[in-house]
Amino acid sequence: MMDPDIAAELDGTAELLRALAHPVRLQILHAVRAGPLAVGEIEEATGIGQPGLSQQLSILRKAELVRSERSGKQVFYQVDGERMAEVAEALAALSGTGAGEAASRHASTAAAALGAAGGTRGAGPTPPGGAARFARVFR
């Protein structure tokens, strides 16, 4: 029988991965990876309409994958780097490797996938090998 603490941790990991396992939510994360964007900017960058965008942002907020900050009437969202580091560690633990080793090995592949998901709007120049930008997401 599995240790109850481990079972609870795996349940939490499953919930987190469910939040990530949706193409629209990945598009949103891609859009806000380089820094905070207002909801309207996210809508423009992704093409996701307001009702659907609000629903998906709510799921990402609940999973603590994005942080939000209100400024006047606008709400700005950005990736929560610390939470993304937890995602990397959880995946590395499942693979039997250290988080640093796993992140290093998969950084360029993941960075390429994020780039292919919607360009590099607002991201600036791609660093050599693409790994540095991805590593920033996981800090």
Image (cartoon, rainbow, N blue to C red):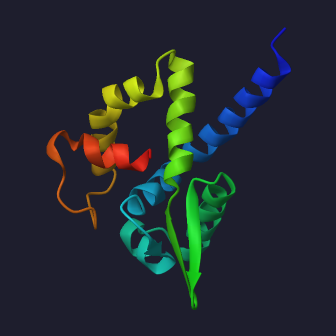
Residue 22 appears in view: no
**The one of 74 and 135 positioned closer to us in this rendering:** 135
> Which residue occupies 32% across, 25% down?
105
> Which residue occupies 79% across, 29% down?
8
On the image, the x and y values in percent for residue 88 come to: 49, 35
Asked if residue 137 is positioned above or below residue 66 in the image, the reply reads above
On the image, the x and y values in percent for residue 93 come to: 56, 22
Residue reaching furthest to the top: 1
In the picture, the quarter occupied by the N terminus is top right
> Which residue occupies 34% across, 38% down?
110
Residue 4 appears in view: yes
> Which residue occupies 81% across, 24% down?
5
Q: As drawn, is 40 to the left or to the right of 128?
A: right
Residue reaching furthest to the bottom: 72
Q: As drawn, is 75 to the left or to the right of 125?
A: right
State the image quarter where residue 103 is shown: top left
